[in-house]
Amino acid sequence: MSTLVLQDQPASIDVVSAQRKPSTGRAIKALRKTLYRSGAIIGFLLVWELVPQFVLEPASKVFLPPLHEVLQQLWKMIISGDLATHIAASLSRSAIGFILAVAIGVPVGLVVAWFSKVGDFLNPLLEVFRNTAALALLPVFTLLLGIGELSKVSIVLYAAFFPVLLNTILGARSVDPLLIRAGRTLGLNSFEIFSKVVLPASVPIIFTGIRMAGTSAVLVLIAAEMIGAKAGLGYLITNSQASFLIPKMYAAILTVAILGFAVNAALVALERHFSRWARA
Amino acid sequence: MSTIEIKNLSKTFQRTGASEQSAVTALESLDLWIQDGEFFTLVGPSGCGKSTLLDILAGLSSPSRGEVLVDGAPVSGPSLERSVVFQQYALFPWLTAAANVQVGLESQARHGQGLNKAERRVRAHEYLRLVGLEGVEAKYPHELSGGMRQRVAIARALAHEPKVLLMDEPFAALDAQTREQLQDLLLDIWKRTKTTIVFITHGIEEAVYLGQKVAVMSSKPGKIKEIVDIDLEDRLSVDDIRSTRRFGEYRHHIWTLLHNSNQQETDTPTGKTLVTSGAPA
């Protein structure tokens, strides 16, 4: 017994000392955590900065300029407004395609899920389309719709449509039948069951589809812009490369990375907001 | 405020097997008469069709033969007059407790015979208070315990003042202590609102404790084996009525009925005497 008590004493002293400075302790912990989490990114950026300067030969350094040169170029493009033009071109195309995909995909998905016979009929075809890479169809879109805005918005629409549609079908089909029964006993008619039970119940899964659609909308657009466009980030990348403006090319790539990251983060936040009730 | 009359009710399910079809009889030629304002419990082994019966009473499924009359009018579908409390609460997880309670009231209002928005909110709070929940109006179901969720579900079922309350093993998923609390709450509400209650359970003690009448069901096919009148004093005014001799007799009698039905029909001589002695004229 006595040894137990003795063992307890230093522990309690520790607790007291820890309680004395809780804020600094916590701050250090948080800082350490942040550092650890961003460690890989910082390491990557360091390699990017240092390897071209000290490891690569001057001839290959041209193709991989160090980070600070790229950032300088990026800053120049921000100041001149050049970058904003390209971002605006890309964002408006992907936004239009994405919004159309959501506006069409959600209602169509709900209808397909509600009328199970329609779903059974369409499902094989949907599977074929879904598993066809959108970019494989880019030549078709270009042939039919030209190289203008229409074909680019269409390819984004196509790429974003299927995640939205398929997740909406999945969400609406996986609604707990008990909730539908409860709704019926509470006086809801078929339409109200649909709008007040099925739709809200499928929102979390629908939003997962919307997030996936947002990501692929950006990815597909960049690729489409690389093939034929007069503005946009994809165009900026290929055009800079063709003009041998290598830092400019990397600046555009960096912008694409940041943009994709931001779009995803925004959609994740939106998804969280709309499905907060689902986290039991 | 409603009598329920079940006449010659049968329900068969078509089971489509690999090659041949077979029909499963869930309920066979059931007759029941449930009085206005009665607390009626149904007890039976699992698979005896008691949930099927409740579904038919609720109007969620239709009988294969026979009919159900509520106040003389045949049941043809779900209605706000017959509320259901499910075992798994069935609250809408995207709505707050108060909004859940208002779902039935909103349906009523859409049909032009209900309360306005402010009145609905007041009513929801009233019923949440009735089930012993205050201050949880703005909470979502996932923030509530199982017992609290079921209280919300009871408030939701009662808020639009139905004539009949149908309960499908509502306390089966709760722990013993919470279950006893909710049983007492339900008795209290029943006495205050005079709603006709049909309560399904597989717990014999629960059936005896709550019911004025206990219908004992047997399975395959589902039939009413016997209806036992429970003549006990007011449960809430007697301390621990479950330990009294009479309560034990009822419990044992029903246990014997259920036990025998599992062993394929033997006679129950003690049954009748207890029923008659338990129901003095």
Image (spheres, coloured by chain):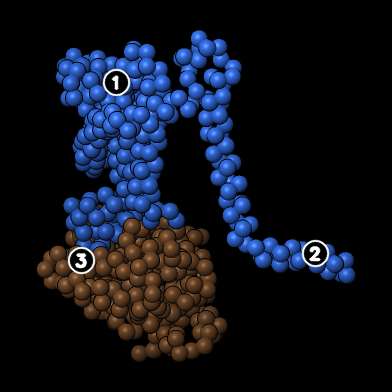
Give the camera-side residue of B266 and B68.
Answer: B68
Crowd band around label 2 with a 10 angstrom C-alpha radius: few (<14), some (14–19), many (20+): few
Question: x, y (%) of residue A179?
Answer: 32, 56
Task: Judge whether residue A271 can be spotted in this image.
Answer: no
At a point 16% along the width and 68% down the height, the residue shown is B109
For marks 2 and 1 on the same chain, the one whose residue lies earlier in the sequence: 2
Q: Nearer the viewer, mark 2 or mark 1?
A: 1
* Residue furthest out toward the top: A59
A198 lies left or right of B110 = right
Q: Residue B76: x percent and y percent?
A: 18, 60
Q: Which residue is mark 2?
A: A10
Label 3 sits on residue? B106
Closer to us: A200 or B221: A200
Residue neighbourhood size for the residue with mark 3, other residues' Cα within 10 Å, grouped as few (<14), some (14–19), many (≥20): many
Residue designated by label 1: A235
The single residue placed furthest to the right in the displayed view is: A2
Q: Position of residue A139 (x, y in %)?
A: 24, 14
Query: Which quadrant of the rendered structure holds the C terminus of chain A?
Result: bottom left
Q: Amino acid at mark 2?
A: Pro
Image quarter of residue B49: bottom left
